[in-house]
Amino acid sequence: MIYLSNAALRYAVNICLELPNYRVVICPESRNEWADLIDQIIDYTPSLAININRAKKTKSGNCFIEFSNESVILFCPTNESSRGLRANLIIVSSKLDEEFINVVLRPMEIKQIIEKR
């Protein structure tokens, strides 16, 4: 789990481009930030548009970016409805309540061991 910053967004994009089926969940302070964050993510890598299958809003109101290698960056609400999501990496706003982070967000993180080849 890392805190939301420009460097964190760049890291999320790079790791999603590099690793197939990688899931990143971004939890900003409010839904109003989602559109700006999507624009920032697309602006970071000029060739990113080639690798994006779709960037859209779901019926439940969540936004996501799906890459051609099936990696996903998902924007989740900062409330109890985000329970049950699974992610390899979680990026959170530093303004979120510490209890919410520990009780709701930390359990959704998938622990991974990366093997050296």
Image (cartoon, rainbow, N blue to C red):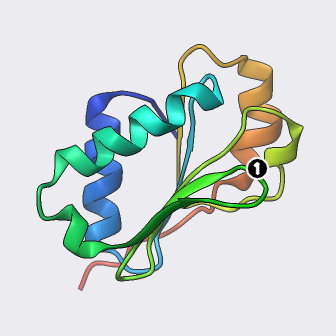
From the viewer's side, name the closer residue of 93 and 111.
93
Residue 44 horizontal/vertical position (percent): 19, 45
Examine the rendered structure and indicate whether residue 18 appears above or below residue 27. below
In this view, 18 is above or below 95: below
- Residue lying furthest right: 80
Amino acid type at image mark 1 = Pro
| Residue at (59, 13) in percent of width and height | 95
Q: Is residue 75 above or below residue 66?
A: above
Q: Secondary structure at mark 1?
A: helix
Q: What is the x, y in percent for residue 82?
A: 79, 47
Q: Residue at x 58, y 26 (%)?
A: 32
Could you tell me which quadrant the C terminus lies in? Answer: bottom left
In-image side of 82 versus 69 (left or right): right
Image quadrant where residue 64 sits:
bottom right
Residue 7 percent coordinates (x, y)? 26, 34
Q: Is residue 40 left or right of residue 96?
A: left
Q: Residues within 10 Å of mark 1 (few under 14, many from 20)?
A: some
Up/down of 30 relative to 62, above or below: above
Instruction: Please identify the quarter of the rendering in which residue 71 is found.
Output: bottom left
Closest to the observer: 106 or 55? 55
| Left or right placement of residue 31 versus residue 44 in this view | right
Which residue lies at the image location 30% right of the left edge and 38% below the top edge?
Answer: 40
Q: In the rendered image, which residue does mark 1 sit on?
A: 107
The residue depicted at 28 percent of the width and 31 percent of the height is: 6
